[in-house]
Image (cartoon, rainbow, N blue to C red):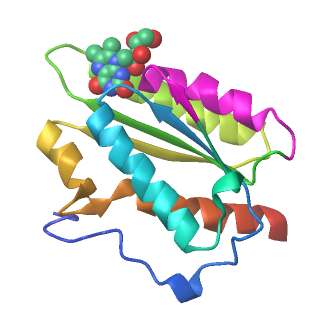
Amino acid sequence: MATANKNLSIYDKESLPQASSFRFGLVVSEWNQEITENLFKGAQETLMENGVSAKNIERINVPGSFELIYGCKKLVQRVHAFDAVIAIGSVIQGETKHFDFICQSVSQGIKDLNLQYDTPVIFCVLTDNTKQQALDRSGGKYGNKGAEAAVTAIKMADLNHSL
Ligand code: DLZ
């Protein structure tokens, strides 16, 4: 399996673009808050480790992952306010088909924002079968997908400025 017992969040700091002048918007879903807070912390720490100051990181909360689309849209509509936006959520499989509808909607919605607006929106939404899988990927044995999303956000912000 691709993730078998590997911390996937290790990255080469030296190879990352300079990020100290960039501004980031982080949209955090309140569902499965234990997970999404850890994802947020991973993203925030990684941005700050790479020179982004606290005043250049703006956080807003939304009730659930479905609302991430609207929250991100409001941020990317603010022209030149952010160099990249990160959508942070955690959807965990239950007994009904709700999981599939939310996962489909959020991934399609974030994709649509990337097509419509010029600010990159990064997909940091865990879609797990169990809470343990989510814990493992939000600061557990497989690392922190929030940190990985921050690395991606820095790379995409830099790419956007270079094109
Ligand atoms: C309703 C719901 C359910 C069952 N599960 C989750 C989940 O695992 N993760 C998540 O982020 N949100 C969940 N939600 C809430 C929806 O995302 C949304 O907030 C509501 O359907 C209201 O639009």
**Residue sitting nearer the eye, 14 or 117:** 14
Residue 47 in the image: above or below residue 111: below
Residue 24 in the image: above or below residue 17: above
Residue 18 in which image quadrant: bottom right
* Residue 97, horizontal then vertical, whole percent: 25, 15
* Residue 122, horizontal then vertical, whole percent: 56, 49
Which residue is pictured at 75% across the width and 37% down the height? 76
Q: Quadrant of ligand 1?
A: top left
* Residue 125, horizontal then vertical, whole percent: 41, 41
User: Which segment did they paint magenta?
Assistant: 60-80
Residue 102 in the image: above or below residue 160: above
Residue 90 in which image quadrant: top left
Which residue is pictured at 61% across the width and 27% down the height? 71
Which residue is pictured at 29% across the width and 41% down the height? 35
Left or right of 147 on screen, residue 142: left
* Residue 51, horizontal then vertical, whole percent: 64, 73
Q: Is residue 161 visible?
A: yes
